[in-house]
Every structure is written in C-alpha cells, then in structure tokens.
Image (tube, rainbow, N blue to C red):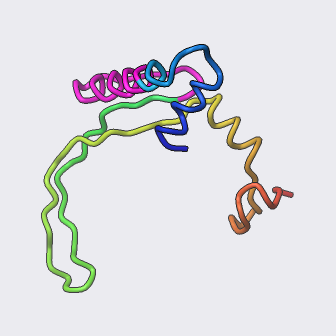
Amino acid sequence: MNKSDLVERLYQENSLTKRECRGAVDTVVDAIVEAVAEGQEARLVNFGTFKPNPRKETVKRHPQTGEKIEVPAKVVPKFSPGKGFEVAVEENLKVSKDGSGELGVEEVK
C-alpha cells in the first residue's frame, strides 16, 4: 500500500472528497514527521510509535578494501509496532518454524 492507495481507501470508506482525504493523510504524516523531528514521540495506540533514535559515532570497515570508515553520530527515526498491529500481522501471516516459506502460505506447526 502506498500513499495513493491509502487516500483511495479513505475516500471509499468516508463521505469526503479525494482532495479532503489527501489533505487528511498529508496532515497526519506531516504531524508525525514534525513531532519526531522535534525530538518527540508520536504514539498511535494499537498501531505503533514513531520516535527519534540517536546513534553513536562508530567506525566501520569497507567490505572489499578493509579501509576504516568513520560513521558520524546521528539521529534516525524509528518505528515500533503496537500490540494490536503485531497481533494482526501474527494472526494473518504465518511462516514455517525455520523461517522458510512464503508469508501467509505455510502455518507454524
């Protein structure tokens, strides 16, 4: 699902125009981005939490040359799914115990 699909779904399930639906989706996304960019959490019950995640400065190695590469400290956004989201995914999509198989095809025994 992409943003256009989400707008279409909102349009189909409400008495709003497509323009109003697009505006609503944009407003929600912008509010989440703004909150996280200001260092706050955006928590949506049963969906999940968006929050800033600080990362320390570190040194990595280039896999082909072995050259050391310094990676500066930075803050990246992080999403943690809520309980309702996790339960919905777990109930609808199953894989085998060893992790093989296509999602939704094989059930865990």
Image coords of residue 49 (percent x, y)? 45, 29
Question: Which residue is drawn at the image coordinates 36% and 25% (left, top)?
Answer: 32
Foreground pick, 97 / 16: 16
The picture places residue 16, in percent across and down from the top left corner, at 54, 15
Dividing the picture into quadrants, the one containing residue 41 is top left
Q: Which residues are magenta?
A: 23-47
Which secondary structure class fits the magenta region best?
A: helix
Q: Quadrant of the N terminus?
A: top right
**Which residue is situated farthest in the top direction here?**
15
The correct choice, above or below, for 86 with respect to 69 in the image is above
Q: Relative to 46, does residue 60 appear above or below in the rendering?
A: below
State yes or no: residue 37 in magenta: yes
Q: Residue visible at 44% across and 26% down? A: 22
Quarter the C terminus occupies: bottom right
In the displayed structure image, the side of residue 8 where residue 20 appears, left or right: left
Who is closer to the viewer here, 9 or 96? 9
Q: Is residue 35 above or below residue 91?
A: above
In the rendering, at what x and y percent does residue 36 appear?
30, 28
| In the foreground, 25 or 54 | 25
> Going 65% across and 22% down the picture, which residue do you hit?
13
